[in-house]
Image (cartoon, grey):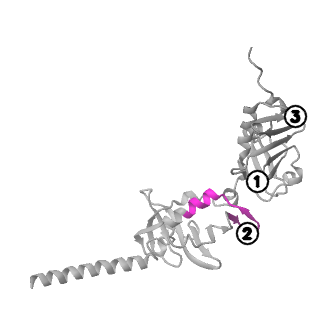
Amino acid sequence: MRLLKWLLALTGVLFLVTAGYWIWQHRSGQRFPFEKSVPQADIWTLQYGPTTLVFAHRVNDWTVSAGSGAFTADINRVKKALDNFQALSVEDEISDRADRASEFEVDAASGVRVELMKGPASLGAVILGKPAPDVGHSYIRFPEMPNVYLAKGIVRATLFPIDLKNWRSKDLWFLNDDPIVSILIETPSARTYLLRSSDTWTCNGEPADKTAAESLASQLHALRADEVVDLPIPADLAPEKLTFARIVVQTKSSAHELHLGTRDAKFQRSPAALANDTNIVWLYDYRVNALLKTPSDFLPASPQK
């Protein structure tokens, strides 16, 4: 009889624990709100104040837009954000009062709303608030619900700044395993044409220093800008104005052409764009100086006596 009572009591405790856990999960939406949504999503949005960024999946990358005109998104930032969304886990409820939303920065004015979608259908949304005092957690709220929860897996600050400029890709080209066979550099003062032949290089038809040529080729293998130019593009930075210098990289299977404009002396940078592209970027002086080489940079080393 005593054993039966003990078993009944244990069953009751297990029931209460299970019921409590079920209620907790359903009150908070779910334990991992984006765990299953991230792999399905082909659109996701970030909304902060008046700014809304829309990310759309393409075959091998993502685009980002803010109203009109889509640009290639920074793939590393996108992947990191999606990984963090998938890892987001909801923990303790902190408040169920709507009037405390601003205290935790999960209101419309200061919260960051994240929504994942499959086509036009929403897969889930959450509003990210400020970090909790322990730093490892943040406050979150589900739209249309007043409840505020502790969550971990993502820090809102990693999404800032939430503007188009900072989520656009700065990658100009990446050549993978496609070797460079020639490099043409044209400036007002010089024309430099490097040509690879087997394991040697020539510069304007003359033997070139292999180490210097290979160093430049290595830098041009993966070319990345330092900044993107804010929209709208100023008239003096329009693509047709970028005529100061030209770099053409030819690989075994493709050609890539970069145009540079007049140097901005104040900020020590130069505007640039790929041929037939309206996206304008900035290259800082250190990068431009490393790319705009002249024939004298490739003179073979004098033999030692």
Mark 2 vs mark 3: give the one in front: 3
Q: At 67% across and 56% down in the image, what residue appears?
A: 166
Question: Which tag, 1 or 2, sits closer to the chain's start?
Answer: 2
Give the residues drawn in magenta, as a range: 62-82
Q: At 74% across and 37% down in the image, what residue appears?
A: 199
Amino acid type assigned to the residue bearing label 3 in the image = Gly
Tell me, yes or no, whether the highlighted magenta stretch contains residue 189. no
View extreme (left): residue? 1
On screen, residue 88 versus residue 249, left or right, reads left
Amino acid type assigned to the residue bearing label 2 in the image = Gly
Amino acid type assigned to the residue bearing label 1 in the image = Val
How far is disc 1 from disc 2 in space, using C-alphas?
17 Å
Question: Residue tagged by mark 3?
Answer: 205
Q: Quadrant of residue 305?
A: top right
Percent position of residue 208, x then y = 80, 31
Q: Quadrant of residue 294?
A: top right
Question: Residue tagged by mark 2?
Answer: 67
Mark 3 vs mark 1: give the one in front: 3
Label at residue 144: none
On screen, residue 23 versus residue 168, left or right, reads left
Up-down relation of residue 109 to residue 185 (above or below): below
Examine the rendering and report whether any part of residue 303 can be seen.
yes
| Mark 1 Cα-neighbour bin, 10 Å: few <14, some 14–19, many ≥20 | some
Question: Which tag, 3 or 1, sits closer to the chain's start?
Answer: 3
| Mark 2 Cα-neighbour bin, 10 Å: few <14, some 14–19, many ≥20 | few
Percent position of residue 112, x then y = 57, 66
Residue sitting nearer the eye, 160 or 22: 22
Classify mark 2: helix, strand or loop: loop
| Mark 3 Cα-neighbour bin, 10 Å: few <14, some 14–19, many ≥20 | few
Residue sitting nearer the eye, 55 or 199: 199
Question: Residue tagged by mark 1?
Answer: 229
Examine the rendering and report whether any part of residue 105 can be seen.
no
